[in-house]
Amino acid sequence: MRASESLIQKLKAFEGLRLEAYRDAAGVPTIGYGHTKGVRMGDRLTEYWADQLLRKDVGQVAYEVMQLGVVHTQGQLDALTSFAFNLGIGRLIRSTLLKTIRNGGSMHQIRKEFMRWVYADGKRLKGLEKRRKWEADRFFESEK
């Protein structure tokens, strides 16, 4: 199983496209649709290459998510890949979200865990609320 085209399109919407390197909220040089590896300030790229980098990055994150042994549907893979793409695989691994999934938590409990991750610098962000709601909804979908 691998990340769906639906996930790629959703990530493009969530991340937004920046063709010139910028510093993200944590000060990390970033370009394209959230690509950070090897980025230097002043770097530029085309939309084509931004798409290629996103697909490569998402493929790697999806692989790491699959290694956790909790994914049984395309929806679960897409949801957890989006979460880990945004926050990092380490945060997913240490999260109570993953613990709840592993312990067979209810739909309500798992949705609640997704929604705990809507803050940046102590502020609740509408964009993160929208993303986490999509992830929670996608987690419980079994099709593309």
Image: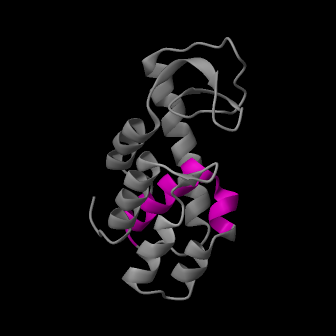
Work out whether residue 50 can be spotted: yes
Front residue of this view, candidates 29 and 127:
127
Residue at the (56%, 73%) spot, across then down: 97
Image coordinates for residue 63, horizontal then vertical, percent: 57, 56
* Image-based side of 30 in relation to 142, left or right: right
Image coordinates for residue 76, horizontal then vertical, percent: 42, 67
Outermost residue to the left: 143
Report how many numbered discs are placed on residues in the image. Answer: 0
Residue at the (32%, 65%) spot, across then down: 137
Front residue of this view, candidates 59 and 139:
139
Work out whether residue 1 can be spotted: no
Locate the N terminus and report the quarter of the image it occupies: bottom left
Residue 77 in the magenta stretch? The answer is yes
Q: Is residue 104 above or below residue 133?
A: below
Residue range of the region highlighted in magenta in the rendering? 73-93
* Image-based side of 56 in relation to 75, left or right: right
Q: Is residue 116 above or below residue 22?
A: below
Image coordinates for residue 26, horizontal then vertical, percent: 69, 38
Res 109 quadrant in image = bottom left
Front residue of this view, candidates 133 and 3:
133
Locate the C terminus and report the quarter of the image it occupies: bottom left
Outermost residue to the front: 123
Residue at the (38%, 81%) spot, across then down: 107
Residue at the (41%, 48%) spot, across then down: 126
Residue 89 in the magenta stretch? The answer is yes
